[in-house]
Image (cartoon, helix red, strand yellow):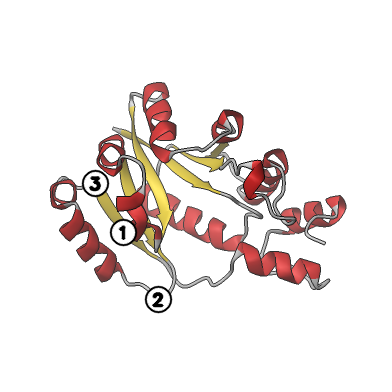
Amino acid sequence: MAKLGIFGGTFNPPHLGHLHIANGFLQAFQPEELLIIPSFVPPHKESPDLLPGEERMALCKRTFQGEVFRFSDMELQRKGRSYTVDTLETLKAQHPEQELYFLVGDDMLFYLPFWKDPERLLTLAHFVSAVRTEQVSTAELEQFAKTTYPQQYADGRFHFLTLLPFPVSSTEVREKRKAGQSLKGLVTPETEAYIKEKGFYL
């Protein structure tokens, strides 16, 4: 069955670390498409540095370039508290002919038991954990999945993607921008140009 990749996040802003994970996933799993989904952040959680959803979407389109990338504002439109299970239910209904592959960062898997309806999540999509730091190993993640969700692990619902470390964070990008430093090597040139043009993160 054809694969649909899903990569969600705040993306405030999207950076080369996100692109590194996305490209590693594309190479390893070769989905037909990789859907980028910026998350809605409720207004009461806003910080001065948080860009509106439509601007984070615009930055995503300048970061993830190529025909394989698609973009969805479904969580931005939904507003309110956005649960991954709702997003995956919607996508499963929209793409019944595709297997969903949900891409998460290396430490997010440990939080899966605290997500809404994790067992349902694992019936809707395969979970792909991208290991890109030295703080956590593939073996640790695999052992956690095997112990916590033995049946789903045995059914092949977990996958582990080991990538070269790429230490960059959205916080670092915002801090360098605020300090007036170059963002070269942290974000794509198109992303940096848009950030400067719009006067973001000052």
Corner quadrant of residue 182: bottom right
State left or right for residue 202 relative to residue 78: right
Q: Which amino acid does label 1 sit on?
A: Phe
Report if the CB atoms under discs 3 and 2 are less than 8 Å apart: no
Which mark lies nearer to you, 3 or 2? 2
Where 59 sits versus 88, above or below?
A: below
Q: How far from the left and from the top, in percent, is residue 194? A: 79, 51
Task: Locate the N terminus by quadrant.
Answer: top left
Identify the residue at image location x=20%, y=48%. 156
Q: Tell me, yes or no, whether the two marked residues, 2 and 1, touch with CB atoms within 8 Å.
A: no
Cα–Cα span, label 2 and label 1: 15 Å
Marks 3,1: beta carbons within 8 A? no
Q: According to the image, label 3 marks what residue?
A: 157
Measuring 25% from the left and 36% from the top, which residue is drawn there? 123
- Which picture quadrant has residue 177? bottom right
Q: Check disc 2 and report the residue beneath it.
A: 135
Residue most toward the bottom? 134
Task: Say which of 73 and 34 sits in front.
Answer: 73
What residue appears at the point 43 percent right and 37 percent down from the top-left corner?
Answer: 32
Question: How many C-alpha atoms fall within 10 Å of the one at disc 3: few (<14), some, or many (≥20)?
Answer: some
Residue farthest front in this picture: 44
Residue identifier under label 1: 160
User: What SS does tag 1 mark?
Assistant: strand
Relative image position of residue 50 (x, y in whole percent): 69, 52
Mark 3–mark 1 Cα distance, whole angstroms, equals 10 Å
Toward the viewer: 47 or 55?
Answer: 47
**Quadrant, the C terminus:** bottom right
- Sequence order check, earlier mark of 2 and 1: 2
- 25 to the left or right of 160: right
Q: For marks 3 and 2, give the CA distance.
A: 23 Å
Q: What residue type is labelled 3?
A: Arg
**Which amino acid type is marked by label 2?**
Gln
